[in-house]
Amino acid sequence: VFILERRDIEGRHPQQIAQALTEAFDKFCATDGSANAANN
């Protein structure tokens, strides 16, 4: 679970927030397709 808290969002540019979310996605989300297979 990844949480981007309000204090981490306020005062930041949208590109910085997007970068933080992208990094979290890359770190915590499966890339081998196993997550999609579990949902089928």
Image (cartoon, helix red, strand yellow):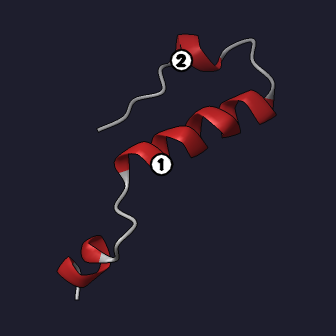
Picture quarter with the N terminus: top left
Picture quarter with the C terminus: bottom left
The location of residue 29, given as percent across then percent down, is: 37, 55
Count of picture labels: 2
Instruction: Looking at this view, name the residue that lies furthest to the left.
Output: 38
The location of residue 12, given as percent across then percent down, is: 75, 18
Report the disc number at residue 6. 2
Q: Is residue 37 left or right of residue 24?
A: left
Identify which amino acid the numbered label 1 is placed on: Phe
The crowd level at tag 1 (other Cα within 10 Å; few <14, some 14-19, many 20+) is few
How many angstroms separate mark 1 from mark 2 (CA)? Answer: 18 Å
Q: Which residue is mark 1?
A: 25
To which quarter of the image does residue 20 belong? top right
Q: Is residue 33 above or below residue 28?
A: below
SS at circle 2: helix
- Residue at screen point 68% across, 39% down: 18
- Residue at screen point 73% across, 28% down: 16
Q: Is residue 14 left or right of residue 39?
A: right
The location of residue 10, given as percent across then percent down, is: 67, 14
Q: Is residue 35 above or below residue 13?
A: below
SS at circle 1: helix
- Residue at screen point 36% across, 35% down: 2
In the foreground, 7 or 38: 38
Q: Is residue 6 above or below residue 18?
A: above
Q: Earlier in the sequence, mark 1 or mark 2?
A: 2
Q: Give the foreground label among 1 and 2.
A: 1
- Residue at screen point 42% across, 44% down: 27
